[in-house]
Amino acid sequence: GIQVEQSPPDLILQEGANSTLRCNFSDSVNNLQWFHQNPWGQLINLFYIPSGTKQNGRLSATTVATERYSLLYISSSQTTDSGVYFCAVERESNYQLIWGAGTKLIIKP
Amino acid sequence: ETGVTQTPRHLVMGMTNKKSLKCEQHLGHNAMYWYKQSAKKPLELMFVYNFKEQTENNSVPSRFSPECPNSSHLFLHLHTLQPEDSALYLCASSQATLAGPLGSYEQYFGPGTRLTVT
């Protein structure tokens, strides 16, 4: 089956820093989504990005489907950015989402 | 607020109890999902309903029994659970088509029910 690997597994930064999170996947996929899970467990969609680049405020994402990876950029980090960031890819055969293990981000004030 | 609500938010139950988790979505979606999130593991898809019909059951033990009475509501009935079933149970919804595969639609998640089995 498809393997989804996220790196780094953990990241601790000072407020104001920039960061890049990576998602590699092992096979062709229909689509890719980035999610943020806050410390209370709520998952929020960040980007729905099969290819190309999208930006939303301080966050942006780039997916290069031909090379099977996606990057999530967070600029000028705030403490509210803390949580776990998940990448999920959509399997071509049955449209199910396959999830990575996540990157746990801690932003210190 | 994502438009998907779940109750209860926390649940502690013994192995012989029967309880139910409830999910409701206010987004007009027709596909609903149950996921299990255990510590240190990726999210695991349990069940998928498309227009009230179950389309996926990812080898989930029979002690978990889903029910989808309409496109807005989804239940997960629990009985004789094991301590290893303790986890965060997440409900999600998305748009859907009647044609079969769900297609490339974004999923919206509820806040989850944190379940502890003692």
Image (spheres, rainbow, N blue to C red):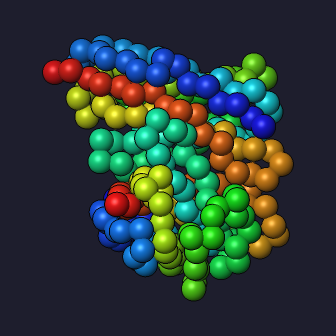
| Residue pictured at 30% horizontal, 41% vertical | A39
Image x and y of residue A64, in percent: 70, 23
Which residue is at the front of the view, B80 or B22?
B80
Image x and y of residue B53, in percent: 70, 77
Which residue is at the front of the view, B53 or A74?
B53
Q: Quadrant of residue A3?
A: top right
Q: Residue furthest bottom?
A: B69
| Residue pictured at 82% horizontal, 69% vertical | B99
| Residue pictured at 29% horizontal, 48% vertical | A40
Q: Residue furthest front?
A: B16
Q: On the rendered structure, is A41 left or right of A96?
A: left
Q: Quadrant of residue B60?
A: bottom right
| Residue pictured at 73% horizontal, 24% vertical | A68
Q: Quadrant of the C terminus of chain A?
A: top left
Image x and y of residue A87, in percent: 56, 35
Above or below, comparing residue A92 to residue A74 in the picture? below
Which residue is at the front of the view, B12 or B66?
B12
Q: On the rendered structure, is B46 left or right of A67?
A: left
Examine the rendering and report whether any part of residue B106 can be seen: no
Examine the rendering and report whether any part of residue A49 can be seen: yes
Q: Quadrant of the N terminus of chain A?
A: top right
